[in-house]
Amino acid sequence: MTEQVSFSPEVKKVTNKSNGNTEVLLVISNSSLKGKADDLNEFLGKTVNIMIVPENYSYNVPFDNSINKPTMEYKVYEDGTVQLVQQEQTQLDVDGKGNVDIIQKSFQVDKQVIDDYILNAGSIQFPGEINPREVLQRLAQGISMGEIAEELEFSESALINELEHARCKLAPFADAWKKANEKGELLPVEDTNTDEKEPESTENDTENEEIVPEDTKEDGAADGEENPY
């Protein structure tokens, strides 16, 4: 029997029935189940373990509402490293008490973009208790999440949670890296020497310009704002 089937459905509906059961309707409108239908049928009538993780993530950036510009920037270097830099304060004092008009704008990043960043960007200081680059590399080699978890002495669900935590925290860095890559601003991976570079900033760093915002979150929704980076 097939050990597992992975696909990317939309959670369409959740219904609580009068008999105490809960029905969850998953709709697959993409090709993620192509060639796997027979494998999925093997699980009919059986109890399975399902963990739902997002296909995209959102993060917030503070904007000075008076000039509609971000108060921080994810600066991307040629070698693919990314640092969070606070912009020089130019906000207007809106009430005479030193307060400024700051709003939060939300931006969305696909999981594949984040995974590409983790696998291919320059030196990264990963948040959490695992090295997500190694986990993704092992998954790409066909090793199951369960086998990797056993080797790392994690439960499978704990390993998935750690990987999701890393994706969530690295989402804004990945978004900036993607934009720079699309503009041709990065050196090819083989031309970079990541061993000599400073690691990206995460929320574990202490300098102001290297703090990951706390409101980075997993979310399928975005407000449609154009990313300033």
Image: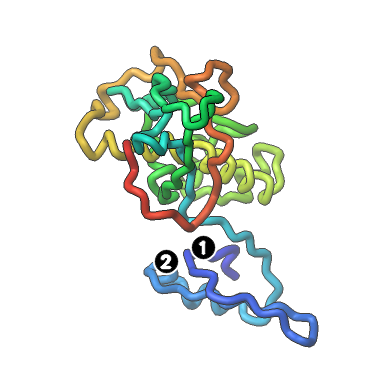
**Residue 167 visible in the picture:** yes
User: In this rendering, is residue 101 above or below 110?
Assistant: above
Q: What's the amino acid at mark 2?
A: Ser
Q: Which residue is denoted by mark 2 in the rendering? A: 32
- Dot 1 falls on a residue whose secondary structure is loop
Q: Which residue is denoted by mark 1 in the rendering? A: 6
- Dot 2 falls on a residue whose secondary structure is loop
Give the residue displayed 52% in from the left and 26% down from the top.
96
Quick one: 210 or 155, which is closer to the camera?
210
* Residue 106's disc number: none
Give the residue displayed 48% in from the left and 49% down from the top.
57
Give the residue displayed 49% in from the left and 47% down from the top.
139
Position of 21 with respect to 102 (left or right) is right
**Spot occupied by residue 202 in the image (x, y as percentages of width and height):** 53, 27
**Spot occupied by residue 13 in the image (x, y as percentages of width and height):** 58, 76
**Residue 122 visible in the picture:** no
The earlier-in-sequence mark between 1 and 2 is 1
Quick one: 212 or 154, which is closer to the camera?
212
Number of marks in the image?
A: 2
Q: Quadrant of residue 193?
A: top left
Quick one: 157 or 171, which is closer to the camera?
171
> From the image, which quarter does the C terminus lie in?
top left
> From the image, which quarter does the N terminus lie in?
bottom right
Give the residue displayed 35% in from the left and 38% down from the top.
68
Task: Tell me the distance, in whole angstroms, between the alpha carbons under discs 1 and 2.
Answer: 8 Å
Position of 150 with respect to 175 (left or right) is right
**Spot occupied by residue 10 in the image (x, y as percentages of width and height):** 49, 69
User: In this rendering, is residue 11 above or below 52?
Assistant: below
In the current view of this chain or complex, which residue is farthest to the right? Answer: 19
Position of 20 with respect to 174 (left or right) is right
Q: Are marks 1 and 2 in contact (CB under 8 Å)?
A: yes
Q: What's the amino acid at mark 1?
A: Ser
